[in-house]
Image: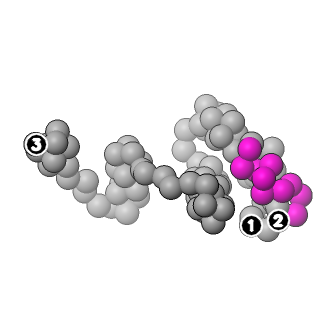
Amino acid sequence: MVKLLSRCQSPEELFSIISKENFIKAWPKLKRYWVRVNKETDFRDWWQTIYEEILKSQGKGKKNITLETLARICKCLDYELVIDKHVSNGD
């Protein structure tokens, strides 16, 4: 299925082959596999966004991002992530 995801150019293309429900069920395992095989991939990140949008539209997920994810986003956008130690320690 990872090969299928890496070859599909749009969500509509994928969802003409498998259902959104099957994608939602399979994505966590696929993502873990993809992380082991290739640490950084635009395809995985793109499909992760699709996954989150589907969950959001179905009312199944509200996701808080981790500091690690925020740092990666900032790096991609060429922003500097500044964390105030007083805020992060709850002071």
Q: Which residue is mark 2?
A: 13
Residue 38: percent from left, percent from top = 61, 38
The mark nearer the N terminus, 2 or 3, is 2
Q: Which part of the image, by quadrant, shows the C terminus? A: top left
Q: Main secondary structure of the magenta part?
A: helix
Q: Amino acid at mark 3?
A: Asp
Residue 68: percent from left, percent from top = 38, 43
C-alpha gap between disc 2 and disc 3: 49 Å
Marks 1 and 3 close (CB-CB < 8 Å): no
Marks 2 and 1 close (CB-CB < 8 Å): yes
Along the viewing direction, whichever of 53 and 47 lies nearer the viewer: 53
Q: Amino acid at mark 2?
A: Glu
Q: Which residue is mark 3?
A: 91
Return the mark for residue 57: none
Magenta residues, as a range?
16-25
C-alpha gap between disc 2 and disc 1: 5 Å
- Residue 34 in view (yes/no): no
The count of marks equals: 3
Residue 41: percent from left, percent from top = 59, 48
**Secondary structure beneath label 2:** helix
Q: Residues within 10 Å of mark 3 (few under 14, many from 20)?
A: few
Q: Is residue 40 left or right of residue 8?
A: left
